[in-house]
Amino acid sequence: MPCGARRATLFVNTLLLSACLQAQPHYDALLEQARAGHYQPALSFLRGQVGGWASPRYLSDHLLIAGWAGEDAEVVRLYEGYGAQVALPADVLTGVARAYRNLRLWQPALAVYERGLTRFPDHPPMALGQVLVMADAGQTQQAVRRGLRLVQQAPHDAERRLALGYAHLRDGQPHAALFQIDRARELAPQRSDVASEYLTALQRAGLAEQALAFALAHPELLDAARQRQLQADALAALVRMADMATRGEVERFRLADQALADAERLLQAWAELPQARADSLRVRIDRLGALHARVRMAELLEHYRQLQAEGVELPGYALRWVASALLYLREPEQAAELYRRVIAGENDKHPLWLADHQGLFYALVESEQLEEAHRLATRLAAQQPPRLYQPGNPEAEPNARWLEAQVMQANAELYLNDTPAATQAFAQLAGNAPNNSSLRTSLASLYQVRGWPRRAEDELKVVESTAPRHLGLEVQQGLGALQLQEWRQLDLLTDDVIRRYPENLQAQRLDKLRRVHHMAELRITAYRGLGSGSSVSGGHDLGIDSVLYSEPLHDDWRLFGGAGYASADFEEGRGHHRWQRGGLEWRVRNQRLEAEVSRHDYGHGDKLGLRLNGWYDIDDHWQYGWSAQSLSSETPLRALNADISADSLSGFLRWRADERREWRASLAAAHFSDGNDRLGLLLAGSERLYTAPTWQADLGLEFSAAHNNGSADVPYFNPAAEFGVLPSLSLSHSLYRRYQTAWSQQLQLGLGSNSQRDYGSAAVGLIGYGQRLRLDDRFDGGITVSALSREYDGDREREMSVLLDLNYRF
């Protein structure tokens, strides 16, 4: 009851008592003391009268004064022992009901109000008290209805507005409550209790900044502890707004920066206040959210570990920030552990429940726990129905979680290397939602993964018509430009995204690939024969070839230069070949050309060599290429050792369906200086047999044919005609993979047949084992040990060798 009403009630009852007890001036003095707030003298006197009251008014006075003194249990005992059968006044019944309410005994309180309203139906304090207790007892809708009736009867009564506001608040309608209490404040602007209720309503409505401003304008409403609480509330609200993804590009960090500045100011102000330790801890925790919104993830982890060292147990919302920071900083194992803790503390009603599962999914993917990630995505997709029925709406509405779960499952298929299933899933989703730019961008990204950059480009053009500056769109367009050799477009897109979103990992990834593209490139290939070798390759053969490409010049051009050496033992003696070369490379969309001049020394003086070759991409599936060489690099070393050189002309046509199927046909013609003309044909293809997250198996098939019109009586292997068939099985296994580091092993097995004119057919066997390492987008190297067994001119020979290849950007 408001203070004014309570004093009025006290005054009325004091007059009644005085009228009845004019002969008891001592009792009047006790009542005056109780009225002034000194309750114990009157209570001591009245407690001595229990059960033997000299006046029937003593019971009513005892109930009233005990209620004012906060002795709720005493009020309840008196009422249940003596007052339940007495016709008590309205104010006394109201006080009894209030005592029951203070003791959280809702049903007895409602019973007293019901009894009182039967006798006093027009008693406003009793009607308002009933609304409050109904709200406390969970009968919120009834409380709201009764409160509305009371307000309609007297819309300018502040007490009725306060009661209705309380009912709205208990009914989960903080903004409706704020409206009613704001009206009460307008009706009673001078009442401090109404102002206090208004401050609380602002807090409950989530308007922490407005609550703090109101409190600072009315300092009499709160003490230092309450002020610190409001300041911490305002900071928490600012952090929540700063972390929203809907902020504009230019000002997206403004709120985060303000939150960090406010947090620092509060922590400094409270540093010397022991009583503010809990408030300081709350601010330190919320500062993690501001750092997360500002994408200062390393600082976030530093502060988190300080809190850990102090034994602070973070709430779930703060653990979510830490998990996200760990994932950003490439610590996915720890991120997965924290996401599991967050998920364990919430249910599927939580608004971030699916987002937390998405965080766990990507933490599992990035820590290479791909099978578990796939199971998680499949389970979530099965749990979400496409449509949901909302209360009060007979029409089913689309379920946003269903789409997010479907996208997660499609990505899970991609990470399992099941690219056909992922393509089908994304194509179906994008087809059902053609205006969803995110789905189309994801589909285009998958096309790029599968080696279809032009198809991806067409898809991204559709997205560009609806969201031309979308970050994901520009990143994928930049990656497509890199594949399509659109160097100027790559630079423009990369400059734009890294300027607008320097903290974004996708933008950083594109910028990293662009920087690698602009680096110089070193390529090295080498081989070493093991044992005596064969008559074709020679014994103890070895060779190395290196070429260094410059950084791109004017986008499309690169200079290159290199040198190499080869040697082997033959019946005629050991052969040597040294060469140096230099040239120019031109790369534009769909095509690449190289022109080279070389110097050769193979024991018969310096020789000049020329090479011109090119490649052209017709579309995402077809490519052709050609090469013309004077002093061909394909000339056998044994022929060069005998001062026999060759010029060559070759071409190829390749069809590539996707990463799982490919065929290539090539034709090569060579003219040797001894008059021999060689024509060779090769048809080779591969087909994926098995795919798993870390295993791949491909079936290869190779048909080869060659014809020479020269004499067989020459130093080098020169069959009149031969035809070969070689099926093979290639296995690839990922030993270790973490972001841009990949270590794998390969095994190749081949068994076929080769037919040589005048020598018949014989089996061909091939086995090879190798390992490969890729690091930081800049290093790619592998080493392979291989063995080949086949017949040359009717004699079976075996070749074993070690092969090395390396590509390094710097």
Image (cartoon, grey):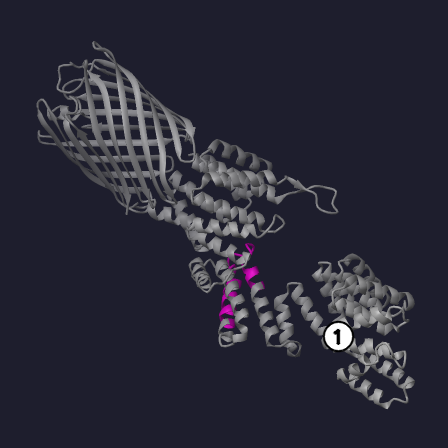
Specify the quadrant that holds the N terminus.
bottom right
Pick whichever, 567 or 145, lies toward us: 145
- How far from the left and from the top, in percent, is residue 338? 49, 52
The residue at which mark 1 appears reads as: 71
- How far from the left and from the top, in percent, is residue 671? 20, 21
Q: Secondary structure at mark 1?
A: loop
Pick whichever, 593 or 2, lies toward us: 2
Indicate yes or no whether the magenta region holds residue 260. yes
Could you tell me how many numbered marks the image carries? 1
Q: In the picture shown, does residue 20 fall above or below 328? A: below
- How far from the left and from the top, in percent, is residue 455? 47, 35
Q: Main secondary structure of the magenta part?
A: helix
- How far from the left and from the top, in percent, is residue 550? 26, 44
Say if residue 592 shows up in the picture.
Answer: yes
Q: In the picture shown, does residue 551 fall above or below 126? A: above
Amino acid identity at mark 1? Glu
Pick whichever, 711 or 286, lies toward us: 286
Q: Which residues are magenta?
A: 237-266
